[in-house]
Image (cartoon, rainbow, N blue to C red):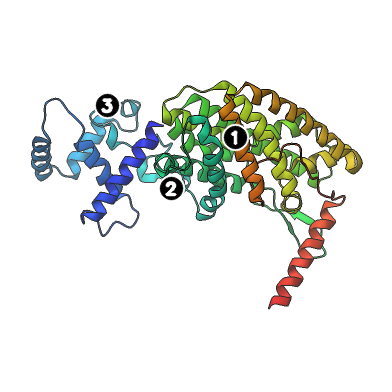
């Protein structure tokens, strides 16, 4: 969490540099401005009894005499690639990257740092809105006060967007595309994200967060993506799948909400409320089922995890709705039991939020307690995908 706060400080200094004309006009994303921002932050840190004016004078005099040879000698003496350089030195901490990258910084590539695409940020917006409106009340925050939202939004937005970026990478390995379309059998897209590669991609975020509870939930994300690949690949081969894997996956699927919630406990300086976490875990399970029922056809087309797809494969089209209804009923009993343990005002606020989300309609991450609509089941997924692609192709030709 400290690292995320440091990133915010750097961004503020970068904005200040831009407004004062201090940015390097020749810096084209090469890191020059960011280095200067770190340097300025380093300069304002207390060091013994030195005043800011004395620091500026010392640095100015030093820079007149120092050259690249001197820097290379210092680098050699400090043994920057060894363990000594990784230790915290209070006077120089801010000059080092907030993450200990696996490579030397001069060899750093785009794949070694947390990178977020615009599409991932866009997809994260609905989750962030729902999280703020549904979870802030558990932290005593008023969603109607902008300062309460924007104080935490940068951290939440960065984290959720990065998770969506990784989710997109995982879905790339599940997408089925036609070969010699439209007559050939669908084949798996060759771009694949293994558990190891996704874990490596999660490392930058993991190191930034540096909190044991958050780290465990991030590992849950890796487990979910691994199970999603395992289950969806099995379905595409008509292999058997286990109910144990399916139920584990659906419970892991909301790991991003738990990551954001644990972040809020850290950011607000509160102890984790286990009762709230347990209650929200049951609610998240019901929300995921609700979302899966809404997205059923899209998930079939994209070959992504969907509990109704899985139940249909395990129990068959006749028994799948009954078995899913049984799981929903058991979860609703737990939901009601935990709800009674909450503070009445908090329970009422959350209930009103669920009703509000239901009234808004569309894909909203909230379940309608006691009301569930299971869509018609797709018995032949491959034929369904082919028919949908044919219709989409026909529509495109008609429009042209």
Q: Is residue 180 visible?
A: no
Write the residue at 23% across / 30% down.
77
Q: How many other residues sit within 10 Å of disc 2, few (<14), some (14-19) or many (≥20)?
A: few
Q: Nearer the viewer, residue 118 or 219?
A: 118
Q: Which residue is mark 3?
A: 89
Q: What is the quadrant of residue 333 in the picture?
A: top right
Asked whether 357 or 231 is in front, the reply is 357
What percent of the width, then of the height, locates residue 64? 9, 45
Q: Earlier in the sequence, mark 2 or mark 3?
A: 3
**Earlier-in-chain disc, 2 versus 1:** 2
Q: Is residue 20 left or right of residue 359?
A: left
Spot occupied by residue 33 in the image (x, y as percentages of width and height): 28, 50
Single out the mark in the foreground, 2 or 3: 3
Could you tell me which quadrant the C terminus lies in? bottom right
Q: Residues within 10 Å of mark 3 (few under 14, many from 20)?
A: few
Give the spatial CA distance, label 3 vs label 1: 46 Å
Residue 183 vertical position relative to residue 323 in the rendered view, above or below:
below
Residue pictured at 52% horizontal, 29% vertical: 215
Residue under circle 2? 109
Is 91 placed left or right of 370 in the picture? left
The outermost residue toward the bottom is 400
Secondary structure under tag 1 reads: helix
Label placed on residue 350: 1
Q: Residue at x 65, y 42 (%)?
A: 355
Q: Nearer the viewer, mark 2 or mark 1?
A: 1
């Amino acid at each position: 969490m400290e690292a995320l706060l440091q990133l915010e400080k750097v961004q503020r200094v970068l904005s200040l540099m831009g407004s004062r004309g201090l940015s390097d006009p020749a810096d084209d994303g090469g890191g020059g401005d960011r280095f200067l921002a770190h340097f300025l932050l380093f300069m304002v840190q207390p060091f013994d009894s030195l005043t800011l004016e004395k620091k500026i004078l010392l640095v100015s005099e030093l820079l007149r005499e120092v050259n690249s040879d001197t820097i290379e000698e210092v680098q050699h003496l400090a043994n920057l690639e060894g363990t000594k350089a990784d230790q915290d030195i209070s006077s120089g901490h801010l000059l080092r990257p907030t993450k200990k990258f696996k490579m030397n910084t001069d060899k750093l590539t785009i794949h070694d740092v947390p990178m977020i695409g615009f599409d991932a940020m866009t997809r994260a917006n609905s989750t962030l809105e729902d999280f703020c409106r549904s979870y802030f009340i558990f932290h005593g925050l008023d969603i109607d006060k902008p300062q309460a939202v924007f104080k935490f939004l940068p951290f939440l937005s960065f984290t959720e967007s990065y998770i969506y970026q990784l989710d997109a990478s995982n879905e790339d390995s599940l997408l089925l595309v036609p070969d010699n379309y439209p007559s050939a059998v669908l084949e798996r897209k060759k771009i694949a994200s293994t558990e190891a590669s996704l874990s490596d991609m999660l490392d930058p975020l993991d190191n930034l967060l540096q909190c044991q509870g958050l780290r465990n939930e991030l590992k849950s994300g890796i487990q979910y993506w691994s199970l999603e690949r395992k289950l969806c690949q099995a379905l595409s081969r008509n292999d058997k799948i286990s109910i144990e894997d399916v139920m584990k996956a659906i419970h892991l699927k909301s790991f991003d909400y738990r990551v954001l919630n644990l972040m809020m406990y850290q950011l607000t300086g509160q102890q984790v409320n286990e009762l709230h976490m347990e209650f929200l875990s049951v609610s998240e399970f019901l929300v995921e089922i609700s979302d899966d029922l809404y997205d059923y056809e899209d998930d079939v087309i994209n070959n992504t995890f969907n509990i109704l797809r899985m139940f249909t494969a395990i129990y068959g089209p006749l028994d799948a709705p009954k078995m899913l209804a049984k799981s929903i009923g058991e979860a609703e009993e737990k939901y009601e039991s935990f709800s009674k343990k909450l503070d009445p005002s908090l329970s009422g606020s959350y209930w009103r939020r669920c009703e509000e989300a239901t009234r808004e309609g569309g894909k909203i991450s909230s379940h309608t307690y006691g009301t569930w609509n299971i869509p018609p089941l797709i018995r032949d997924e491959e034929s369904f995908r082919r028919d949908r692609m044919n219709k989409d192709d026909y529509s495109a030709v008609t429009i042209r």
